[in-house]
Image: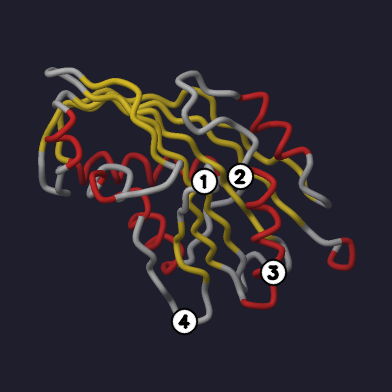
Amino acid sequence: MAEQATAGRTPARADGKTTFATVLEVDPTHEQRARDIAARFQHAIAPAAVDFDSGGLSRAAAAVPHARTTRIVRGWGLQETAPVGVMVVSLKEAVRQALAEPFANPRFWERVEAALTGAFVGLGGQEGTHLSFHEETAERTGYSYHVLFALQDEETGDAVHAVALRLDATVGLDGARTRALTVDDTAFFALRVNAVSVTQVPPTAG
């Protein structure tokens, strides 16, 4: 997953040592807090597991210091034949639903959209355990994709809001065509999202 640098912000990143690609849209003074939250989730679930481990994700959320679990999304689903771009918009709405409040930060939502586009586009060039293929036939391809978003800005104050999301996707194409999808391509998609969001407010800010 390619890095997308923004001034004063942490780029999206995925590597072979972690389960979740991370998108941290936070003030530099709160960056370490956001990284610490992300670290709680990185090994909470097995990236290659076909079945989603909701317990592992919930335990990771409960282990974040000075935080509370604000939303849990279980089995949000969608089946549709549509362009990739439509699927991205639908997933973006799922992230909105997972957050505690409808935050307006445009840079955050631009980066959310870019990361979710990466859940469909350019899969063949991505490396890391955030992406795991578990079914490939001539008719369909199934895979899971993990991404964690964190937001802190003037609107959130000292609170850091984070969403750890797992997407399970089945695409009505073979593996080669799935790995080569572009945002304008149309295919059959069956999507299922599980996510948990946490809000961390340090004691001095409470």
Q: Identify residue for label 1.
A: 20
Residue on which disc 3 sits: 157
Answer with left or right where residue 104 lies relative to residue 114.
Answer: right
Instruction: Identify the amino acid type marked 3.
Output: Gly
Name the quadrant containing residue 142.
top left
Q: Left or right of 141: which side holds 35?
A: right
Q: Cα distance, mark 4 to mark 3?
A: 19 Å
Mark 2 element type: helix
Q: Of circles 4 and 3, which is in front?
A: 4
Residue type, label 4: Ala
Q: Quick one: 134 or 75, which is closer to the camera? A: 134
Q: Closer to the camera: disc 2 or disc 3?
A: 2
Crowd class of label 4 (few under 14; some 14 to 19; many from 20; radius 10 Å): few
Viewer-side residue, 36 vs 58:
36
- Give the Cα distance between marks 4 and 1: 22 Å
Q: Name the residue that disc number 2 marks.
A: 42
Q: Nearer the viewer, mark 2 or mark 4?
A: 2
Give neighbour class at mark 2: few <14, some 14-19, many 20+ (Cα, 10 Å).
many
> Is mark 2 in CB contact (under 8 Å) with mark 3?
no
Residue 102 sits above or below residue 33 on the image: above
Residue at the front extreme of this rendering:
16
Q: Which of the two residues, 22 or 113, is positioned nearer the viewer here?
A: 22
Left or right placement of residue 162 versus residue 12 in this view: right
Which residue carries the number 4 mark?
A: 7
Cα gap from disc 3 to disc 1, whole angstroms: 25 Å
Q: Are marks 2 and 4 in contact (CB under 8 Å)?
A: no
The amino acid pointed to by label 2 is: Gln
- Residue at image location 26% in from the left, 23% down from the top: 79
Mark 1, secondary structure of its residue: loop
Look at 13% across and 18% down and name the residue there.
Answer: 139
